[in-house]
């Protein structure tokens, strides 16, 4: 039976635990990091978050180097742009951010409400669908994005740091507002054109339970992991909780954390 190191990263803390099947082998205390708020913005410093991940893993001691696989469950959306080396060019903009109301209205007006819904299954909710955050940066911080080589969510940033890969999963991809959610066929060119961005800046989409890469030597030394350990693509934390609860058609699932999130299995 495989031993798994799980990293649960929400909007205020990191929880690390080791599981063998359904049995918890070890669990670290919650390690908090700061979300910086203004009236309309909600941002996390990427370096602060990496420090929290490192500290959470350190609490597990030597057991963290003996696991068979690492799995990620992350807050979503948590938008961030990265350079060619994977270094963050922007803060991590969380789902609580509401600065992009004007940009959201423009995105929907250009494509049309019904067309947007038909393509990705959601309206461009400010901050909650991260295409609006990307639009805000294109309008207000275009210089920052000129060096961008990859744009994604927190799980993509963590994979870039831990495995060096450029990946995400369908749950995170759906919340970008750029993914063909109904067909699961990949990034939607019409949605990308509406935003004015190239799909080449987006990560590859693979299933959550697929190995996205392995721990690099540099990440192993930094985080206290074993080099070569496989890391699953992972998924958004709300989806992870819904699966654990045993999603059934008609069941409403409520995540109570820094924000409340409702999920209904249809």
Image (spheres, rainbow, N blue to C red):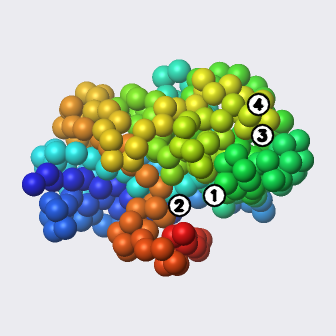
Residue closer to the observer: 121 or 159: 121
**N-term mark: 1 or 2:** 2
Residue closer to the observer: 181 or 216: 181
Can residue 239 be seen here?
Answer: yes
| Quadrant of the drawing holding the N terminus | bottom left
Is residue 90 placed above or below 101 in the rendered structure?
above
- Kind of element beneath mark 1: loop
Can residue 36 be seen here?
Answer: no
**N-term mark: 4 or 2:** 2
**N-term mark: 3 or 2:** 2
- Residue at the (32%, 33%) spot, across then down: 213
- Residue at the (73%, 38%) spot, across then down: 191
Measured from the top left, where is residue 14 in percent x and y? 40, 59
What is the crowding at mark 3: few (fewer than 14 residues within 10 Å), some, or many (at least 20)? many
- Kind of element beneath mark 4: helix
Q: In the image, which disc is placed on residue 254?
A: none
Q: Determine the residue located farthest toward the left in the rendered image.
A: 1
Residue closer to the observer: 166 or 43: 166
Give the Cα distance between marks 1 and 2.
Answer: 9 Å
Is residue 174 placed above or below 151 in the rendered structure?
below
What is the crowding at mark 2: few (fewer than 14 residues within 10 Å), some, or many (at least 20)? many
Provide the residue designation for mark 3.
135
Provide the residue designation for mark 1.
95
Give the Cα distance between marks 3 and 1.
Answer: 15 Å
Provide the residue designation for mark 2.
11
Is residue 41 placed above or below 50 in the rendered structure?
below
**N-term mark: 4 or 3:** 3
Measured from the top left, where is residue 149 in percent x and y? 58, 23
The answer to whether the residues at label 1 and label 2 have Cβ atoms under 8 Å apart is yes
Provide the residue designation for mark 4.
193
Q: Is residue 23 left or right of residue 77?
A: left
Give the Cα distance between marks 3 and 2.
Answer: 22 Å
């Amino acid at each position: 039976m495989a031993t798994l190191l799980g990293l649960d990263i929400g909007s205020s803390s990191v929880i690390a635990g080791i599981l063998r099947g359904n049995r918890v082998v070890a669990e670290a205390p919650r390690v908090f990091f700061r979300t910086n708020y203004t009236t309309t913005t909600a941002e996390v410093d990427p370096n602060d978050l990496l420090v929290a991940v490192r500290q959470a893993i350190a609490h597990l001691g030597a057991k963290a180097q003996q696991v068979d696989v690492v799995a990620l469950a992350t807050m979503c959306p948590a938008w961030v742009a990265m350079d060619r080396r994977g270094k963050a060019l922007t803060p991590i903009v969380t789902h609580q951010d509401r600065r992009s109301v004007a940009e959201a209205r423009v995105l929907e007006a250009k494509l049309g409400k019904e067309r947007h819904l038909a393509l990705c299954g959601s309206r461009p909710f400010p901050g909650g669908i991260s295409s609006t955050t990307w639009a805000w940066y294109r309008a207000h911080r275009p210089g920052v994005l000129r060096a961008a080589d990859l744009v994604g969510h927190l799980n993509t940033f963590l994979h870039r740091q831990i495995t060096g890969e450029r990946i995400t999963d369908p749950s995170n991809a759906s919340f970008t507002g750029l993914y063909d959610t109904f067909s699961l066929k990949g990034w939607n060119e019409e949605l990308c054109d509406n935003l004015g961005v190239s799909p080449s800046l987006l990560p590859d989409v693979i299933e959550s339970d697929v190995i996205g890469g392995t721990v690099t030597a540099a990440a192993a030394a930094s985080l206290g992991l074993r080099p070569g350990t496989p890391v699953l693509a992972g998924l958004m934390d709300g989806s992870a909780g819904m699966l654990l609860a045993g999603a059934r058609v008609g069941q409403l699932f409520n995540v109570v954390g820094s924000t409340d999130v409702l999920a209904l299995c249809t």
